[in-house]
Amino acid sequence: MEKSWFKNPADKTKKVFFFADTPHVLKLLRNWFLDTGFVLNNNVYVDKTPIRALIELDSNELKVCHKLDKHHLECVGAERQNVRLAAQLFSNTTAKALELYKPVNDVNLIRNLSAFIASVNDWFDVMNTYVPQQSLQTSKCGYGLYEV
């Protein structure tokens, strides 16, 4: 696809932009990640193995990834349509926990997977933003227009 817009039929000076259904793309990313993993641009393969190890390490009473459990990796059937599970799997919390715990010995895999998850999280924040600045959670604004 060369362009993601077309001329507005009512006003030829304006463009109408289109993009994929964000929650659906997030679920597809998660499903593909769980089923096969990804080969990233730098020819590095990432899969769910470090996350499975992270869940096992983080199974104590006090958890870093308190929302993440085996259910996120073993969802089948209608559960694969659950956007919340996909968003929790690809969250900044998961990315940071991978860096903190380093659940597998391959440091490059951890670094690449953490960066991939953080990128998916940031993409989802931008694409799932309804207004330029959210009043209740200004630090979660996908456009980055917030004051600290």
Image (cartoon, grey):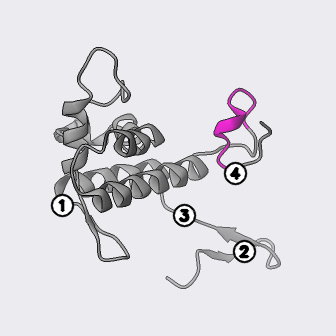
- Tell which circle, 1 or 4, labels the residue nearer the N-terminal end: 1
- Is residue 20 shown left or right of residue 71? right
Of the pair 10 and 143, the residue shown nearer to us:
143
Q: Earlier in the sequence, mark 3 or mark 4?
A: 3
Q: Which quarter of the figure is the C terminus placed in?
A: top right
The type of residue carrying mark 4 is: Tyr
What is the C-alpha distance between the residues marked 1 and 4? 31 Å
Dot 1, crowdedness within 10 Å: few (<14), some or many (≥20)? Answer: few
Instruction: Locate residue 96, reporting x and y percent.
Output: 43, 42
Q: Earlier in the sequence, mark 1 or mark 3?
A: 3
- With 139 as the anchor, is 93 left or right in this view? left
Q: Which residues are magenta?
A: 134-142
**Which mark is in front, 4 or 2?**
4
The dominant secondary structure in magenta is loop
> Which residue lies under the disc numbered 4?
143
What residue is disc 3 on? 19
Mark 1 vs mark 3, foreground winner is 1
Query: Seen in the image, is 3 located left or right of residue 64?
Result: right
- Secondary structure under tag 4 reads loop
Q: Which residue is mark 1?
A: 36
Q: SS of the residue at dot 3? A: loop
**What SS does tag 2 mark?**
loop
Name which of mark 2 and mark 3 comes first in the sequence. Answer: 2
